[in-house]
Amino acid sequence: MATLLSVNVGTPKDVSWQGRTVHTGAWKAPVRGRRLVRRLNVEGDGQGDLAGHGGEMRAVLVYQSQSYGYWAEQLGRDDLTFGMFGENFTVDGLPDDEVCVGDRYRIGEAEFEVTQPRVTCYRVGMRLGQPAMASLLVAHRRPGFYMRVITEGHVGSGDEITLTRSGPEQLSVADTDALLYLPDRDPVKLRSALRIPALSPGWQRSFEELAAGQQPAQKSGWPGFRPLRVARIVPETSAISSVYLETTDGTPLPEARPGQYISIRLPVGDAAPAVRSYSLSAAPEAGTYRISVKREALGKVSGYIHATLRPGDLVDIAAPRGTFVLEEGTRPVALISAGIGVTPVLAMLHRLAAERAARPVWWIQVAHDRAGQAFSDEAHTLLAQLPDAHEHTYYTSKVPHPEQPHVSHGRPTVTSLKALGIPADVDAYVCGPPPFMDVVGDFLRAHGLSPERVHTEQFSALPAINPGIAPTAAVRPHQPPGPSGSGPLVTFALSGITTPWSPAHASILELAEACDIPTRWSCRSGVCHTCVSHIVTGDVAYTAPPLELPDAGEVLICCSRPSTDVVLDL
């Protein structure tokens, strides 16, 4: 008979960690007496990061006393006390390789249902002073598990734990955890996981993506950089020029998905070649790619393109990539952009026009004035080829403009966007600077759009995922502080930073953080793949082997260092 040995609670607090502040509820301690367990948590308990912990499906975290004994021996520790693994219930019994997702248990007055294994998270390692702990929990198949509350009630140490119903597929917590985080997945078990109603929605989505990923994928493009020839350069406005690129031998270029970008490497000045990424601004035609570049006042690369690049020049180009792409479907489409953010959505408009798409299309563009509005005539021509197209432009200049149809003066607001009559079932694609993205995002959320229907692209790296880290003021990416390194060059292509590697950094992730480059991570130990990044060229070495290697052309930056000069999509 399994037994509840300890009820552990703790409210979120701010903890100093690696020069940052982490808001976390991982510090839990045993309590005396009986505690009421409600739908969202145990009385007196709380979670600091509700995106990854807590909520109805993760109300109670369970860990076993047998695993405490196991880790005491493995880690050579004699100071492990109940609650240190962040669990609410420390139990005798209920091993991860026997408890199944969907099992229900009676404890005291309450009844619970197992919903998922523990989320791999750096904070358990932070709590134990063992940075690799998230990886160890998975590798040793001892993650622990979450439960939701079926019947609220009081519980206390000494309560017996009784199985009231078995999970429908008899898929253990350990096997479920391995399906997500370890290689060589069993397709039979993966299908079983998708048939468990009790499995939390987040894990269901992950398994659906894994099941879809087992289908053979078509690869296109080329590895690293290859030389392309500048076919022609066309001024679009006084500040924006389009560069058309073609192969050196006349062979066709691989087709890009509308919305993707390419990286260009140019010999700017005497330093190492600079790498920048630019969206393709049109569908490939006549064997060419087109990028459209705005000349920035302090932009070395954009300045070189405008002042120095000439037709016939050879430039190094990486193959098209990126996930901000037009999806197939029949729902209405809203293509919303500001300034040079028009480029990826213009490529989408080209695709829709080429297909004579029947779906309604809303084209909304923000520019300073008519003279600075790139591709206005081109977009208008493309929209005329669609049977159900809607067009609107905002001019932000305070200089009066003649009245024109479908034109507003001033910046878009939630109110003005609502007045355009964009339907509530739209798929939205939005690209522009952060303040613009905030306004459009507010409108779309108020419009009732779910997050998966809103696709965004910013003029920088992807938005950061740093769970639990207290927000700080945004800082423009820069060279890392301190003495310059002498190792291989690390280029963060989306942030425009190239810097030599220094062993003062434990990983590429830590170097990126030192440069204030937005980063995405959760476990920081090679398990969750949140930090996975596209590597354009170069090689890395892993400081600790990840539990599952990423796909070819990708790298886990949380546990790797450069072996050669590398270019990364960060």
Image (spheres, rainbow, N blue to C red):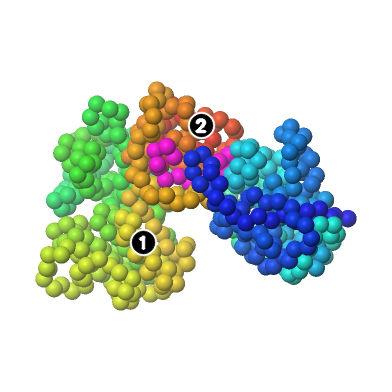
Residue type at the position of mark 2: Ala
Q: Which residue corresponds to the image point at 77% horizontal and 49% vertical from the top-left? A: 64
**Which part of the image, by quadrant, shows the C terminus?**
top left
Residue type at the position of mark 1: Asp
Sequence order check, earlier mark of 2 and 1: 1
In depth, the one of 245 and 58 nearer the eye is: 58
Q: Which residue corresponds to the image point at 29% horizontal and 73% vertical from the top-left? A: 416
Q: Magenta span: helix, strand or loop, mainly?
A: loop
Estimate the x, y position of residue 410 in percent, counting from the top left: 22, 67
Which portion, as a residue range, is magenta? 513-528
Estimate the x, y position of residue 536 in percent, counting from the top left: 41, 37
Q: Is residue 233 above or below residue 104?
A: above
Residue 161 on the magenta span: no
On residue 338, the disc is none
Q: Which residue corresponds to the image point at 23% horizontal and 47% vertical from the top-left? A: 293
Estimate the x, y position of residue 109 in percent, counting from the top left: 80, 68
Q: Are marks 2 and 1 in contact (CB under 8 Å)?
A: no
Secondary structure beneath dot 2 equals: loop
Say which quarter of the image contains residue 491.
top left
Say which quarter of the image contains residue 373.
bottom left
Tell me if residue 313 can be seen. yes
In depth, the one of 235 and 106 nearer the eye is: 106
Q: Residues within 10 Å of mark 2 (few under 14, many from 20)?
A: some
Image check: 319 left or right of 282?
right
Estimate the x, y position of residue 98 in percent, counting from the top left: 80, 51
Image check: 375 left or right of 64?
left
Residue labelled with disc 1? 438
Image check: 139 left or right of 239?
right
Residue labelled with disc 2? 506
In depth, the one of 89 and 371 nearer the eye is: 89
Tell me if residue 318 can be seen. no
